[in-house]
Amino acid sequence: MESFSALLRTASREQHEEVRGSTFIGDLLGHKLGVDAFARYTEQLWFVYGALEAGARQLAADPVAGPFVRPELFRTAALERDLEHLRGPGWRRTVSALPATLEYAERITACARDWPAGYIAHHYTRYMGDLSGGQIIRDTAEKTWGFSKKGDGVRFYVFEEIPNPAAFKRAYCELLDAVPGDELERQRIVAECKRAYGLNNAVFEALGEEFTLIGRS
Ligand code: HEM
């Protein structure tokens, strides 16, 4: 029988291709957008990780989601340093969430409160993505906008406390494979993972609209 981690990966492959192929990501990585678009995207991530990491603190002792709570994954402090670099020291006064970002953050918060296994779906979708494809985004961002390598602006993509991401991902998959629950619960987690991709896609669409409009004006 396929392991749960493998099931999650194969079941969400189509959704992964969709976010990867989104216009906003294509334009961002294709040197078509300015650093302002990258900063706006980083702002949205700050709201998403705010919800994820508030959930993590609540769930640290939870029997189902607790084992996934690993402080070396936390991204909020890195995002705050990036935003300070990208927007300046007053970034908190101007930072704002798009409606799609609020919807995404609210779904994470609801799962953290009511359904720890559903929270795992969100945890997986973000952190495993950051440890994998996130490195491609970092590399492009450094080259496109001249950030220093692994420095301010792209610290979000640098997991300083995870020296061996491949080993970390293997251990993470073992945790996924050990998630308790019957087949139905596993299917529900897969569905939540697909929903998480959809919520990410909606943020990309909203960002795409914002930057197309700016481009035309
Ligand atoms: C520029 C956009 C992206 C690129 C180039 C990219 C690329 C990749 C690559 C190369 C992998 C590794 C596949 C493997 O180890 O077999 C990966 C894994 C992953 N990506 Fe992305 N990705 C992107 C965006 C995203 C986004 C936006 C999300 C979700 C919000 C995401 C979620 C994931 C997840 C969860 C995995 C782990 C799959 C697994 O091994 O279980 N990715 N990505």
Image (cartoon, rainbow, N blue to C red):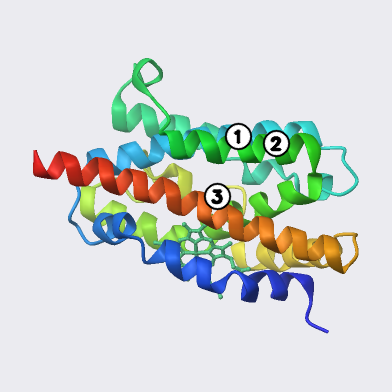
Return the x and y of residue 20 as percentages of the image width and height: 41, 65
The numbered dot on residue 106 is 1
Any atom of ligand 1 within 8 Å of the CB at mark 2? no
**CB atoms of marks 3 and 2 within 8 Å:** no
The numbered dot on residue 110 is 2
Work out how far the residue at label 3 is from the one at label 2, CA to CA, in angstroms.
Answer: 27 Å
Name the residue nearer the viewer: 66 or 185. 185
Return the x and y of residue 8 as percentages of the image width and height: 68, 69
Name the residue nearer the viewer: 71 or 68. 68
Q: Amino acid at mark 1?
A: Glu
**CB atoms of marks 2 and 1 within 8 Å:** yes
Q: Mark 1 packing: few (<14 Cα in 10 Å), some, or many (20+)?
A: some
| Left or right, residue 203 beside residue 188 | left
- Secondary structure of the residue carrying numbered label 2: helix
Q: Amino acid at mark 3?
A: Phe
State the image quarter where residue 29 is shown. bottom left
Name the residue nearer the viewer: 139 or 96. 96
The residue under the point 29% across, 62% down is 26
| Left or right, residue 181 beside residue 202 | right
